[in-house]
Image: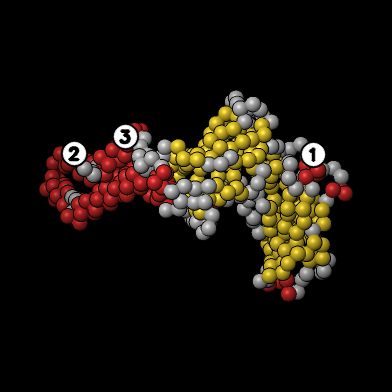
Amino acid sequence: MKKNKTIMLSLAVVSMTCMWSLWPDQSTSVIDQLSISSKALPAHSYLMKTVNSKMSSAMAPSSEVANQHSLLGEGVRLQMVEVAQAYQENSRYPKYSKPLFNNDWNLLHPRAFIPKAILLDFNEGLKAAIVLDQYIVSRDNDLAVRVVISGEALAEVKPETVVVSLSGLSKQGEALSLTHSSFSEGVLTYAGVIDKLVFSSIDQTDVVVNAALSFDNDEAANVTAVFKLVGTDAKMTRLERSYVEGAHLIIPAYFDVLVPGYYRVEANLFDEESQAPISHLNSAFLLTARENSGLLKIHASTLRSKGFVGPYTLSDFNITRGPANPGDKTGYGEAEQDAYKVQGFDFSLYNQETYEDPKNQQRLEFLQKMAGID
């Protein structure tokens, strides 16, 4: 994220510099007009020459302005140096196994659901939010739902019932009453589980979950949230024993495939003992009912940069199927387990070659040239 911000800032600064250099010289335009006017009015030529002289003097670039331009140019160059250095570091690792860090929130939380608390209409001292484990929900799994209620007004007003229902259901009996599960640091939590059998009656993909809250002061409120309900096109059933091949740690993965296609499997590799993040894996391959396996790869340069020889834990799976034709929707898969143990090997068993991509090198040379790096 920080690298992306640096790149965007550099491009913005470069754009501003180009606009500055290409913008018409307004001081020259005004002075030329005054000069023409002085020729047209000879009786006042002395006055016009005086004005012309004063204007030219006032609008001529001062040393201070020149210094500002120089500083701006140097600032752009330094930003480009940072961009080139960041790109050089990033290009040391392949796209399929980039280093993973604690602040890579999006990678560490695939398919994340972001709760949004709202103030309740009848009392702004109360707020409530629906909390789900994931935004993308499989039809094959039960759905855990929580409603959290917080605010200073909880000292005066207490919830009596919390009932959850889903859009697309015609039967009122399919609503779910949540039970009070905890109270901690001024936050009430109600929880329950929606049975996966309910999803068979829902046709749409974008589903609204509504929580109807009633309170002991005869007031009521509603809180809503949206999640994506999807089928399971392929399920990763197991990982076979990992092995070293050249400069890579190879992990064979096997699937039950219901819908054939090109699948992308993303997952995160952690050190088993410390749970320190090591690498974000990103592999793509064709899966069919017969060709039901693919290889997940981690380059040794990524493992060495983190210093962990294993064993490892592989988790945070995000499995998707690319659209087969324009207009088709993305398909989704899942892993049978939340996490898998992966055997590691001593670094001496890997090929010592570093990762290199000729295209990345060409881009790096271009950035270095822009930054004035020899």
Query: At x 64% / y 56%, what residue is drawn?
Result: 116
Query: In the displayed image of the protein, which residue is found farthest to the bottom?
Result: 155
Of tags 1 and 2, the one toward the viewer is 1
Q: Locate the C terminus and report the quarter of the image it occupies.
A: top left
Query: At x 45% / y 45%, what residue is drawn?
Result: 98
In the structure shown, which secondary structural element does the residue marked by tag 2 occupy? helix
Q: CA distance from mark 2 to mark 3?
A: 53 Å
Q: CA distance from mark 1 to mark 3?
A: 52 Å
Residue 35, picture quadrant: top left
Q: Which residue is nearer to you in this view: 9 or 37? A: 9
> Does the CB distance between marks 1 and 2 fall below 8 Å?
no
Residue 145, picture quadrant: bottom right
Assess disc 1: are there few (<14), some (14-19) or many (≥20) residues with their C-alpha within 10 Å of its C-alpha.
Answer: few
Question: Residue 51: x percent and y percent?
Answer: 17, 50
Q: Which residue is nearer to you in this view: 13 or 44? A: 13
Q: Which residue is nearer to you in this view: 246 or 166? A: 246
Question: Residue 123: x percent and y percent?
Answer: 72, 67
User: Type of residue at label 3?
Assistant: Gln
Query: At x 69% / y 47%, what residue is drawn?
Result: 226
Residue holding disc 2: 36
Q: Which residue is nearer to you in this view: 255 or 366? A: 255
Residue 58 appears in view: no
In the structure shown, which secondary structural element does the residue marked by tag 1 occupy? helix
Residue holding disc 1: 200
Question: Residue 371: x percent and y percent?
Answer: 26, 44
Residue holding disc 3: 362
Question: Residue 315: x percent and y percent?
Answer: 58, 48
